[in-house]
Amino acid sequence: ATESLNKVPMPKASSALLLTWSDTFPARVLVTGSSTGIGEQIAYEFSRLGAHVFLTARREEQLKQVAKKCLALGASSARHIVADMSDLTAAQKVIEDVGNSLGGLDYLVLNHVGGSEYFGPFKGDMAAVSRSMTINFLSYVQLTISALSMLQESQGSIIVVSSVSGRIGSPFTLSYSAAKFALEGFYSSLRRELHLQQTNLSVTVAVLGYINTDNAVRIVGDKIAWAANPKEECAQEIVKGGVLRQREVVYPYWSLKPLLLFKEWMPGLIESLMDNTL
Ligand SMILES: NC(=O)c1ccc[n+]([C@@H]2O[C@H](COP(=O)([O-])OP(=O)(O)OC[C@H]3O[C@@H](n4cnc5c(N)ncnc54)[C@H](OP(=O)(O)O)[C@@H]3O)[C@@H](O)[C@H]2O)c1
Ligand SMILES: *[C@@H]1O[C@H](CO)[C@@H](O)[C@H](O)[C@H]1NC(C)=O
């Protein structure tokens, strides 16, 4: 059923989404990295669907503001917990807190990103690689392990926010790209394993291009020429794909199409993909 769903074109209206959603309504949703950026927008999208939203990041004041807006948009409830994902014990504690206050979990949205702000030639900084792997990969795995029994119980969903940099080797962002490739390996394998075990738990990986969040624009805005895509539409596509239990969401849609990438995004990419020595 999941296979055939993936081949059906996305519905234009949200009717199919609301129909699917009504099965689990009102769903319990944890969104990591929801104090700003795409995670904040994902929290708003789930709020519009009436979810119980649970937010987490390091900055409490921002989380409080986002929670307030979630309630105004229609969330059934909005809670938050402060946690630093460079600490795997803190990650574990977030899930304990979710279990205690929501009594279960339907959507685990793994979205936070940190420790990889450096954009430039690789300098052999081992500490930076290790830090990125902990925050951007290992904490995702820890959150998943801790939440797995709740997600199995609810026949829920994991949504993993990844990047084109997790599919195509990306110069100047090696630590970040390595963590995103690791996520792709772990979660596509997990999806297959769950399927073989006939566990009804969906795993959606979102492969994103350049999105106009404040941090992304600050880090790469002056280094690249292409236009950033809107975070609001990006979040809508991620939530839609997750609720419809799709294997993958690609936004913007052309992000993995070499011809369009060449044209719109990375001049020289086609040549590099065709030359097996590069
Ligand atoms: N924007 C893009 O162009 C783009 C492209 C491809 C993929 N993506 C992916 O989309 C996702 C969201 O990106 P974004 O642009 O929205 O990022 P962002 O605006 O920088 O937001 C990152 C979020 O993660 C939190 N965070 C950072 N370090 C943390 C830590 N150590 N512990 C806990 N939380 C931490 C931040 O909150 P605090 O600072 O309050 O902790 C914030 O809420 C990421 O997975 C990113 O890789 C983005
Ligand atoms: C899997 O779970 C979803 C969401 O809870 C549900 O809609 C669907 O019917 C389930 N499928 C099977 C085969 O149990």
Image: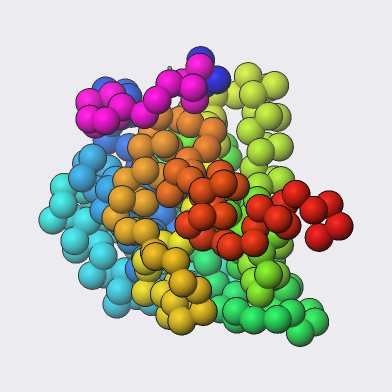
Looking at the picture, how far across and down is residue 168, in whole percent? 67, 54
- Residue 99 lies left or right of residue 193; in this view the side is left
Expressed as whole percent of the image width and height from the top left, the position of residue 211 reads: 41, 62
Q: Nearer the viewer, residue 60 or 175?
A: 175
Residue at the image point whose x is 64% and y is 71% from the top: 173
Magenta-span inclusion, residue 5? yes
Q: Give the residue at the far right of this rendering.
A: 277
Instruction: Judge by depth and name the residue closer to the eye, 99 or 43.
Output: 43
Q: Residue 18 in the image: x percent, y percent?
A: 25, 28
Q: Position of residue 113 (x, y in %)?
A: 52, 66
Quarter of the image where the C terminus is located:
bottom right
Quarter of the rendering containing residue 21: top left
Residue found at x 48% / y 36%: 157
Residue 137 showing in the rendered view: no
Point 68% across, 70% down: residue: 171
* Position of 275 relative to 226 (above/below): above
Q: Compared with residue 20, is residue 129 higher up or lower down, i.e. above or below?
A: below
The region drawn magenta spans 4-18
